[in-house]
Amino acid sequence: MDPTNSEVLDAIDFTPETLLGATVFGAEDEKIGRVTHVHGMGTDSRIVVDVGGFLGIGAKSVMVNATDLIFTRDGDGTVNALTTRTKAEVKALPEHQD
């Protein structure tokens, strides 16, 4: 992901409508997963990310704080998220149960 042509979203944009489906990229520009659920709005939001698997099969859902991610929108309107964690670190988080 190339963040040079992206704008960082403000906390006011941390809504399910904006964040659902965002691709999450890790510390080494690796694709970690996808945002599948958003609990709450703003900086207090809790974000559910599906990690691993193939086409949604075998994926593990984990929850992170919205403040642990940097959400960006590129020129095409695509929203992505960046984390300082690696894919292995995110996969090691406890599984989220709805």
Image: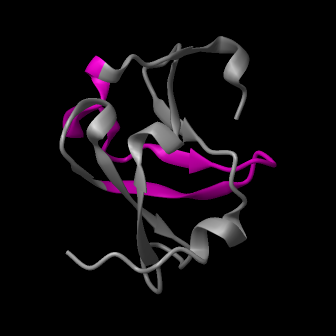
Q: What residue is shown at x 67% (from left), y 68% (from top)?
A: 89
Coordinates of residue 33 in the picture (x, y in percent): 53, 60
Which quadrant is home to the N terminus?
top right
Coordinates of residue 55 in the picture (x, y in percent): 47, 72
Coordinates of residue 13 in the picture (x, y in percent): 29, 22
Quadrant of the image occupied by residue 61: bottom left
Coordinates of residue 14 in the picture (x, y in percent): 30, 30
Question: In the displayed structure, does residue 27 sit left or right of residue 64?
Answer: right
* 9 is higher (above) or lower (below) than 52: above
Question: In the displayed structure, does residue 74 sit left or right of residue 47?
Answer: right
* Nearer the observer, 1 or 64: 64
Question: In the displayed structure, does residue 87 sit left or right of residue 67?
Answer: right
Q: Which residues are magenta?
A: 12-36
Q: What residue is shown at x 75% (from left), y 47% (from top)?
A: 27
* Nearer the observer, 67 or 98: 67
* 73 is higher (above) or lower (below) than 1: above
Which quadrant is home to the C terminus?
bottom left
Indicate whether residue 86 is drawn in magenta. no
